[in-house]
Image: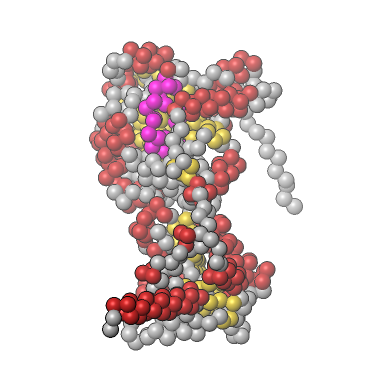
Amino acid sequence: MTPSSLSTRLTLFALLSATTFYFLYKSRRRCLKPLKHLPLNPNPRPGKLFFLTQTGTSKALAQRLLDLLSSKNNIPFDLVDPHTYEPEDLPKESLIIIIASTWEDGNPPQNSKFFVNWLADISTDFRAGNLLLSDCKFAVFGVGSRLYGDTFNAVARDLGKRLRGLGATEMVPVGEGDVDGGELENVFEGWSEKVVTVLKGGLVMENENGIVYESDVESLESDDDDDGEGGEDIVDLEDIAGKGPSRKKSVNVAETNGKLDGKREMVTPVIRANLEKQGYKIIGSHSGVKICRWTKSQLRGRGGCYKHSFYGIESHRCMEATPSLACANKCVFCWRHHTNPVGKSWQWKMDDPLEIVNTAIDLHTKMIKQTKGVPGVTQERLMEGLSPRHCALSLVGEPIMYPEINALVDELHRRRISTFLVTNAQFPEKIKMLTPVTQLYVSVDAATKDSLKAIDRPLFGDFWERFIDSLKALKEKHQRTVYRLTLVKGWNTEDVDAYSKLFVLGKPDFVEIKGVTYCGSSATSKLTMENVPWHSDVRAFSEALALKSEGEYEVACEHAHSCCVLLAKTEKFKVNGQWHTWIDYEKFHDLVALGRPFDSDDYMALTPSWAVYGAEEGGFDPDQSRYKKERHHKSKR
């Protein structure tokens, strides 16, 4: 054989091979199984719509889907709590839809543990076989958070695998909703529409990667037949047997992932809308400010907040703000109902601290101006309110996450605005690096590892170690420090001994003990008024906690209206029998300006008698006017 004839044969072989592989690739792209209908089962037995829920989110989504199926499309389904369902009845079902939340550490919610475990056991039982659910069609939608990494929607994924392994036909691929990504509603809506399409007899194609819907077929065919230009879409022979190229137009990352200049915006349009609906003013891409009800109250001469009673803050001159709307916890008592973003580290675009301070003050003063003409607001108090002297960095989220928090605090102090910063005890290193603030709070929402996990629902796996290290870091601070306890009846009001043991770790100057504020139930929190302690309950808890300290702390102040009590270090703040929990703010700013080390007792001031624990006023400033709203209740007939 001559070299030329050998070369010709090799060329022909290569062309034939390429042609063969090309047609194999084309057929593979289309489908491995022909188009088919998935009609409704003629059996009148309604389908079962299960909700696996812990906080109510999955149940709310399931109810919405039930309305879409039953009311709008006349497809009969029963809404089922798996806790009340006998799993052995599954082989009798012809249609199953499951809305499944993934709870802590990738586990199923409490109401579905038996159901999920039964399914896991039966799917690995050789006696059941892979045809147990062969007459059943199913769909699964997962509710979780991508911030939990590998366990994101683990329950939903596992359920899909188990049901397929038992022979059930998957109507649509497992849907994956992210409660912290801002797109849960849209993703669920799109997934629900595909479920309805299939149940109403819509065409589907099955391939090795899942299911393609009738609505997608046209675009798939046009992709295959597109002979347009674009050299980047030419298929290399080595890639033909692998995954084919996508002919979708490349989209700017900023348009799809909420990123700008390579960095994500913390506040997505959905989060912005939710927060603005609640009265927040969004600053830049990650900060916010909101006028407090106590600010409005003292502007009207109707009393200040507990910080006015405990520390001498002028509530009408206090600005509530945060440089970070994100948080590392998802607390059950969050009064923002988790409409703010969450995260374990700073991963967003970062705004300039000077810009944040300037904008916060500007927006705050605009809100103050809107109170002009409101009954009780005098010209004097209005003018004072336009010059904020205090900043409560506790609006929402975790302010200490902001990388430039020290620069922001310094800027506030430069303007002689005091700083009350609250951290959720998950960033001990940030506490160590924090510049002096007027008063530093650490939220101590529980006294044991299990109860902290249940109440705060932290993102970090080592949340308890972080919590303990945060308390220890507080001990090294020289300025005023506070443990802030939020009492939730039925959750954390029985742990007096455990709380007292935490005192030695941080040696706080003060311990604020406050009853939880009820802000209504939501899909993420099922707290009711039954969980709100009375002021008498808070007093009893506080007295018991002070007693456990064996004299190191005493009950110093109270604010009955806020259901709040203050413990203070006896040796440091009780001078000659009189409490000195108030703050000399001018002295504080002078000490900061000197740039030398100073301690919390260097800027303390005498507490007025009306704020002291047990006083007849109950912490209400007598210079203010009490106002009780008249309530007219309709008589029952």
Q: Residue at x 52, y 45 (%)?
A: 268
Q: Pinpoint residue 138: horizontal percent, then vertical percent.
A: 50, 75
Part of the protein shown in magenta: 391-413
Asked if residue 279 can be seen in this view, the reply is yes
Compared to residue 172, the image places residue 94 above or below, namely below
Q: Residue at x 33, y 25 (%)?
A: 435
Compared to residue 616, the image places residue 244 above or below, namely below
The one of 163 and 17 positioned closer to us in this rendering: 17
Q: Residue at x 48, y 45 (%)?
A: 259
Q: Pinpoint residue 93: horizontal percent, then vertical percent.
A: 51, 81
Q: Residue at x 39, y 70 (%)?
A: 237
The one of 337 and 145 positioned closer to us in this rendering: 145
294 sits left or right of 371 in the view: left
**Image quadrant of residue 400?**
top left
Is 76 a magenta residue? no
Q: Pinpoint residue 189: horizontal percent, then vertical percent.
A: 58, 61
429 sits left or right of 208 in the view: left
